[in-house]
Structures are given as structure tokens and as C-alpha cells.
Image (cartoon, rainbow, N blue to C red):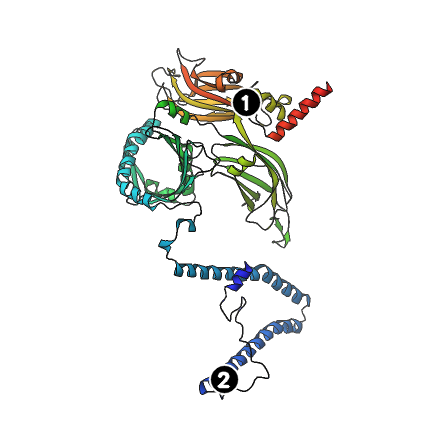
Amino acid sequence: MSNRMEGSAGPGVSANGPVSAPSSPVGSTMGPPLSPDELDEDQESSLTDVTQMWIKFAKTFAIIFPIYVLGYFEFSFSWVLIGLAMLFYWRKNHGTKDYRINRALAFLEHEEKAVRQSVPTTELPPWVHYPDVERVEWLNKTVKQMWPFICQFVDKLFRETIEPAVKGANPHLSSFCFTKIDMGDKPLRVNGVKVYTENVDKRQVIMDLQISFVGNTEIDVDIKKYYCRAGIKSIQLHGVMRVVMEPLLGDMPLIGALSVFFLKKPLLDINWTGLTNMLDIPGLNGLCDNIIQDIIYSYLVLPNRITIPLVGEAELAKLRFPIPKGLLRIHFIEAQDLLGKDKFLGGLIKGKSDPYGVIQLGTQLFQSKVIHETVNPKWNEVYEALVYDSSGQNLEIELFDEDTDKDDFLGSLVIDVAELQKEQKVDEWFVMDDVATGKLHLKLEFLSLLNTPEKLDQVLTSIRANRGQANDGLSSALLVIFLDSARNLPSGKKVTSDPSPFVQFTVGHKSFESKTRYKTNEPVWEEAFTFLIHNPKTQELEVEVKDEKHDCSLGTLTLPLRQLLEAEDMMLSQRFPLRNSGPSCTLKMKMALRVKKQSEEQEKVLWCDAHCVSLWV
């Protein structure tokens, strides 16, 4: 890159500054007499030489004079050495860096100017800025034309769906209503579209839409009972939304359903008005935005999704019961040569660090333990993350130094999950990005999921499940639960009032809770949950329906996971009767158990162990 930047300088200019023109040879013959203009140029050149001589003299005097002053006042010569050392240190760490940055910026400005002069921006092809993303201005024009009708749909959605849900959520919100819903005149934009054609099912189409919405939105709400008015006057939303069209059909409408979700958390910024204007106060605005983001994540960030059916209920049932394509086992082993961020004596002495790691795959987040006082930490921890869609997903890892105020950054790493699925197993050292030094040792295994119980014993042997407790160690299987609905729930403590039920699922030490459905004894949830199972031969699923309003139990259910091993396709879909509940009280659920497929290397090791044991016997 240095050669490229130096070559960009014009004639007569070097990378470090002007270069004088070559002088004529000594023995050259005399030319014609000089003209008056040339004489004036010679005089100006002589004046410039005198000026430069005085500048050099002033610089030399500025350097020598402080030394003379130190000697005159009988200071130690060590002060001079300290001053020179500080000067050299500053030049080494800042001067050279600033010079390189200035050269790079100058080169980039020159390059950008040349491109703009040669090719107009409007004539640039789509792959100039985004190699694998296509521009879709035709789609933005279509959205702009449809925007008034999209706003009508949003208004109807808010008033007919969201408003009744808020009213029923709490008795204090019974007078809640939307007084104004205006999405503004600035439509949502799609900055680019990426369509996946490799490593995807032939019966599906996967698209990633880079969406951006900067709208002059006005949404006002009113709670008449408490004379409370509040609203939103602008919203900004930026993120990558995935649209999956599956299954592709041989008959019209050719597509079975649309699934819409965000791969990662979108960026959201809300400008409040009215009573909620106090939420713009620093500290409160971030807190409130995070609460709203969490609501969006619970509906729209993978593994959550919105499914729009285009065919019958049979095909839709498959889409509402998504089973992960695999599991990524992450062995977070050790790191070496990390930056030492802890400093002593005002930064004069560099110490070590207290490193820890943050691992993220979609909405799944893991954090390692902290290893104190080292730049070569050893964690030896294992995490397991579910993979619903490998295309376009990245495993993101960041290392930090734990501090009392703000943790220091020690490097980051991004790994393509699709590549891991191809390799199946990776065990290597990765160089950390965005830092000068540091590398991380990871062992990554992509495990497929099978509906064959015959493989379970082999997997249990590989993770040594029979030697430990049922809830410790690695998992051998995955349990997926789709909670549909309940019927004839009892009224709880008060016979005259309807319950506000929610469901709690527990396997071992892990628990999940569904959303609460208020004031109904026939709730509909349509939510999915996943459990990593250590040993399905010994573990049980415990289900309890509770009333949030009266804090009591409405019924229980205990299901040994061994029943799923014996079921067809390792799946159960039925209405389960609840114990300790009312008559004919049932809970409709669909459950599936999937066994993790070991890598070929592990299968060979297990076969060799079994063969050696048989020979020994």
C-alpha cells in the first residue's frame, strides 16, 4: 500500500514533500544571456534560500537555548535526557501515525475525485459498493406508490389489534385509545437486496432486505381515565430483514407462505412527545428504546418470525413449528498475546489484563468467565447455539478486559456459519481483528439433527452422559415444543372471574415461560420453545399452567421424554389432559425430539473403542 500511495504523487513531488529539479551538469556549456524575467526569478530564489537559512538557525537556537538555560541554573543533565526521551516517544507513537493517516486520507481523496470525474454516480453499476447486494430502485418506487395504502393497513392494525390487546392487558388501561396514527409521507426504503442461490433448499427462496425507515411519524395515545396523553413524533429503524418464501409449489400461488424476521437486532431510535417527552432525557431514552426493542425482538428477531400463509392450514402448521437445522458447539479454549490494558503509575508501566469473551449468534448470547491478571488466558468452556438458517449468519466473538469503570476492547472475530456447516469441524487459532496483537483458539463443531433414536446410545457414549448427572455436561438431543392453546381452564381462586393464564416449561434446571393471555379460559399462544437435552432416557418435561392475576396453579403435566423416543418420527401432537385442574381441561401441544449427529471423526473413535472392548472380552 505504501508503494501505491507514493506512486500517486504528481511529478516533482515525493511522498515526503517537494523535490528540487535536477541541476545541470557541471561541464555544460553556457546558454544564451538571461532575460529580465529570469533575473527576477534568480533573485527570488536567492531570497528564499536566505529565508530558509534563517529558519534553520531559529530552529537550532530553539533547541540549544533550553539546554543553555538548564546549565545556567545548574540543573542536572538528566532533565535533558528525560525531555529528549519524551520527545522521541511522542514522535514514535503519534507523529508517524498522524503522517501515515494524512497520506492515506490524501490518497483516498485523490482517488475519490478521480472516480467522480470519470464516472457519474448515477451510472455506477450496483456491484461497485455492494458486491453481492443489488439495488432495487424499482421496489422503492413501488413502495412509494403503495405507501398511503400501507399506512391505512397500519392504522387498521393498530386500532383493531393492538388497541384491544392493550385494553385487556391491564384494568388501568381500559380507556386506552389511539387518537392519531400518521406514518408520515416518507416511505420505507430498501437500500439493497441479496438473494441466496447456494447452500439453500431447492423448495425455498431466501432474500435479505437492507431496510431503512426515517419517518416523520405521529402516533398519539390517550388514557382518558387518567387524563394522560403521550405520543411519538419520529421513528428511525435500520436493519437487515430476511424474507423466506417456502415451500415452493407446483400450483398457484406457487408460494406456500412468507416468513419475515430480522437476523440481528435492528437499530431503533424514537423521538417522544407529550407526556413521554421526558423519555428523551439522557439515560431514560436509551432505557425506553431498549424496552421497545425487546418487544420487537420477541416477535421479529430469529428464531421468532411472522408467518403469512398463502395456502391451507396443513402447510402452515409446518411453518409454525420450525425445527433448527443444526447445533453449533463452541469450544472456547484459550487466547494468547492479548493486549495488556491494565496500567500503573499513570500509564508509565503496562500491566496485564482480565480478559473475558462475549459470543453471539443471532439473539443467543454467551459470556465466559473472567481470567484475572494474564494476557494468555485459558477458559476451556463449551457453549451450544442453535442454528435455524446458516446462510447469512455469522458467529461474532469479542474479547474485553474487565475494569471497574468501562471494559477495554481486546479484539473481535467474525466467522461465517455457512462455512462451518461445510467444514463440519474446525480446530485452529484465529487472529483477532481490530487490534495490534492477539489470537484465539477455538474448536467449532456443526452437528446435524436426526429423527433416528438408534443413534442416541452412540451420542450418549461420546458425551459420557451415563457417568454424570442428568442435567450436567453436553447435550445429546434437542427438544422443540410448540404451545398451541388450552381449553376449559378453571377460574383460579375467584370463581366469577376469568384467569390470566401463562405456561411454564421445565426440563432439569432450565425453565421457559410463555406470554400471558389476559381474562380467558381458552387462551391461544402459538409459541415455540427449545430445550437442549442431556439424556432423554432419564429426563422429564414438567408443564404447569399458572394464573398470573391470582398467582395460583391451573393444572400440571409431567411427560417422560422416553415417550418421544418411542413415538413415530420422534414427534407427538395432541391435546394433553392436565392434572390438578378442572374437568376436561386440556393443553394442545406439538413436541419433537431430535438426536445430534456426531462428526465422522467421533464416530470412528467410538467404533474403535467398541471394537477394542470386544476384542479384549
Horizontal side, residue 72 vs residue 245: left or right:
right
- What percent of the width, then of the height, locates residue 571? 47, 19
Q: Relative to 425, does residue 537 appear above or below in the rendering?
A: above
Gap in Å between the C-alphas at discs 2 and 1? 94 Å
Q: Which of labels 2 and 1 is toward the front?
A: 2
What type is the residue that disc 1 sits on? Gly
The residue under the point 53% across, 63% down is: 6
* Residue 11 or residue 486, whichever sits in front: 11
Q: Does the rendering let one see residue 268?
A: no
The residue under the point 42% across, 16% down is: 574
Q: Secondary structure at mark 1?
A: loop
In the rendered image, which quarter is residue 312 located in? top left
Looking at the image, tell me whether mark 2 or mark 1 is earlier in sequence order. 2
Q: Secondary structure at mark 2?
A: helix
- Residue at which label 2 appears: 43
Disc 1 packing (10 Å; few <14; some 14–19; many ≥20): some
Tag shown at residue 508 = 1
Query: Is there a contact, CB below 8 Å, between mark 2 and mark 1?
Result: no
- What percent of the width, then of the height, locates residue 552? 43, 19
Please give the count of numbered marks on the rendered protein. 2
* Residue 550 or residue 117, whichever sits in front: 117
What type is the residue that disc 2 sits on? Gln
- What percent of the width, then of the height, locates residue 244? 40, 34
Horizontal side, residue 172 vs residue 533: left or right:
left
The residue under the point 45% across, 60% down is: 111
The outermost residue toward the top is 583
